[in-house]
Image: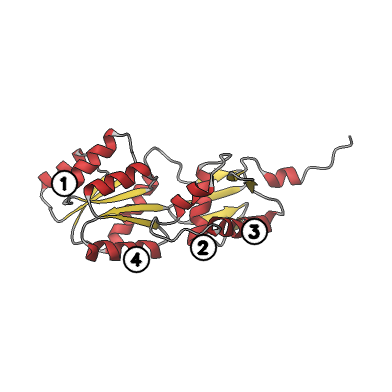
Amino acid sequence: MRVLVVEDDPQISAPFKRGLEAEGYAVDIASTGPDGLWYATEFPYDAVLLDVVLPGMSGIEVCQALRSKNRMMPILMLSARDSIADRVAGLDGGADDYLVKPFAFGELTARIRALIRRGSVQRPAELRVADLRLDPAARRAWCGQQELELTTKEFTLLHLFMSHPGVVLSRDRVYEHVWSQDRGRSSNVVDQHVMRLRAKIDRLTGVSHLETIRASGYRLLEYDTTAEASQPPSDQ
């Protein structure tokens, strides 16, 4: 899952980035209001952490601009201002939640998980595609009755594919969702991770769930491949 942190103080944003990446998130950092608006407009995020006081434009102005562009990802506003009026201004500006500094990192991650569960639109608590099942909040996934042992990147990949069943996702789109923008892009990093994810799933079923579309990307099959594989051969 991918998170944008809009914070102008590197002594705050750097620990956020390290901590969130340790939790399995891909994290991008923007240090000004206009940069945050550009990132959140150009790239898909599962959540945005938005400081109120920013160079160029305030966090509330960024939030209002995103909502006016119909960018409805969950937004958690962060501020040292703790008056009722400040909280009301942030929430009325379009934020989904408001967290007052200083706060414990554990509370921050709990708020992020709650926002992601809620999502930009109503989402099911679990994702189900054929014989695959994924619980975003618990960060667990199953193939049939067998739980999958996935790395954080593999889980994020599977979540992305299961959110778009039957849709061909390009390597660029996959990369932008799973890896941070400041990472040196490798030509085969997506292929390597998809190959490992596919092997873990296929090992349980003996059939392929993730389809490679030549020169285009990857697609998660919507139908139950295990049921198809178990059908007796036709007499014709």
Residue denoted by label 1 = 87
The alpha-carbon separation of the residues under discs 1 and 3 comes to: 48 Å
The amino acid marked with disc number 2 is Thr
Residue denoted by label 4 = 18
The alpha-carbon separation of the residues under discs 2 and 4 comes to: 17 Å
Q: Nearer the viewer, mark 2 or mark 1?
A: 2
Mark carried by residue 151:
2
The amino acid marked with disc number 1 is Arg
Q: Nearer the viewer, mark 1 or mark 3?
A: 3
| SS for dot 4 | helix
**Residue 29 figure quarter:** bottom left
Sequence-wise, the earlier of marks 2 and 3 is: 2
Sequence-wise, the earlier of marks 1 and 3 is: 1
Residue denoted by label 3 = 199
User: Between 74 and 226, which is closer to the camera in this rendering?
Assistant: 74
| SS for dot 2 | loop
Residue 74 seen in the current view: no
The alpha-carbon separation of the residues under discs 2 and 1 comes to: 37 Å
Sequence-wise, the earlier of marks 4 and 3 is: 4
Q: Are marks 2 and 1 in contact (CB under 8 Å)?
A: no
Sequence-wise, the earlier of marks 1 and 4 is: 4
Q: Quadrant of the C terminus?
A: top right
Sequence-wise, the earlier of marks 2 and 1 is: 1
**Residue 95 figure quarter:** top left
Q: Position of residue 80 (x, y in %)?
A: 14, 56
**Residue 19 figure quarter:** bottom left
Sequence-wise, the earlier of marks 2 and 4 is: 4
Q: Are marks 4 and 3 in contact (CB under 8 Å)?
A: no
Q: Position of residue 1 (x, y in %)?
A: 43, 53
The amino acid marked with disc number 3 is Ala
